Image (spheres, rainbow, N blue to C red):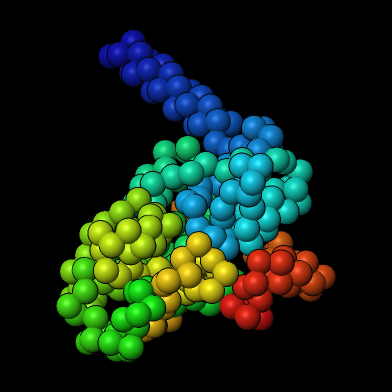
Amino acid sequence: MKNVKRIIAILMAMVTVAVSFVGCSSSKAAKTDSEKIAENGKLVVGITDFAPMDYKNENKNWIGFDADMAAAFAKSLGVEVEFVEIKWDNKVFELNNGTIDCVWNGMTLTDEVTSAMDCSQAYCNNAQVVIVNKDVADKYKTAEDCKELNFAVESGSAGQEAAKANGFNYTEVKDQATALMEVKAGTCNAAIIDSLMAGAMVGEGTSYADLTYTVALNSEEYGVGFRKGSDLVQKLNDFFAASKADGSMEACAEKYGVQAALIK
């Protein structure tokens, strides 16, 4: 009996040591997002083609208000920035899969977004607006007027949610830039896009001079999304506060014509 008790005691001690070892190994393996990006030397940012927030210049480099602010944030962390163009509908998957470190692309802070990600403080106001041809704009001044239209909307976007909420007929497309192309080509007779994009991309002096925006379907705010539990959220909020205080956020916003939308 004494031998049996002794054997049991030894086995329990071995189990305790093994559990402790696993615990130590797990704690050593667990790294914060800040530590991960420092080790990789880069902050990987998920975006789509969305002027004036994220778009490519003539040299094929990503620029825009969000792109420039993301690059400045990465610099403040002592790393480079890398932009990865994602399918917007897959943003949460890309984030949780580790393909990207954050989603920074004029992202509306919907309940769906804030439940799936840890998000920064809001930094810009926005709305979803209806895009139509100029020559028919007078016919579509309210959401009810637009019921007869067939819309192009970015898949997984706030524009798609606005279309659903209003009972509109719509076709899902890759991104908001494609939605504009559908209207210009006549394959859809309207689109729903962000007001900030509409201000930069539609009307006189743009590639879509024959298009205009009419009805604002809602009001919303932009934020940046990180993985749940990420320590980068607070670091970005601190960066936002500092960039507002030193005027660099305002200067960047003025460069891309979005200063009126900034949340002070």
Which of the 4 image quarters holds residue 39?
top right
Q: Is residue 141 left or right of residue 73?
A: left
* 241 up-or-down from 97: above or below: below
* 85 up-or-down from 221: above or below: above
Badge count? 0
* 238 up-or-down from 231: above or below: below
Which of the 4 image quarters holds residue 219?
bottom left
Q: Is residue 72 left or right of residue 158?
A: right
Seen at 66% across and 42% down, the residue is 59
Residue 262: % across, % down: 62, 76
* 109 up-or-down from 29: above or below: below
Seen at 40% across and 22% down, the residue is 15
Which corner quadrant holds the N terminus? top left
Seen at 42% across and 38% down, the residue is 97
Seen at 22% across and 87% down, the residue is 144
Residue 259: % across, % down: 66, 76
Looking at the image, which is closer to me, 242 or 48? Answer: 48
Asked whether the viewer can see residue 110, the reply is no
Asked whether the viewer can see residue 93, the reply is yes
Which corner quadrant holds the C terminus? bottom right
Residue 178: % across, % down: 38, 55
Q: Is residue 120 left or right of residue 89?
A: right
Q: Is residue 55 left or right of residue 115?
A: right
Give the residue furthest to the right. Answer: 246
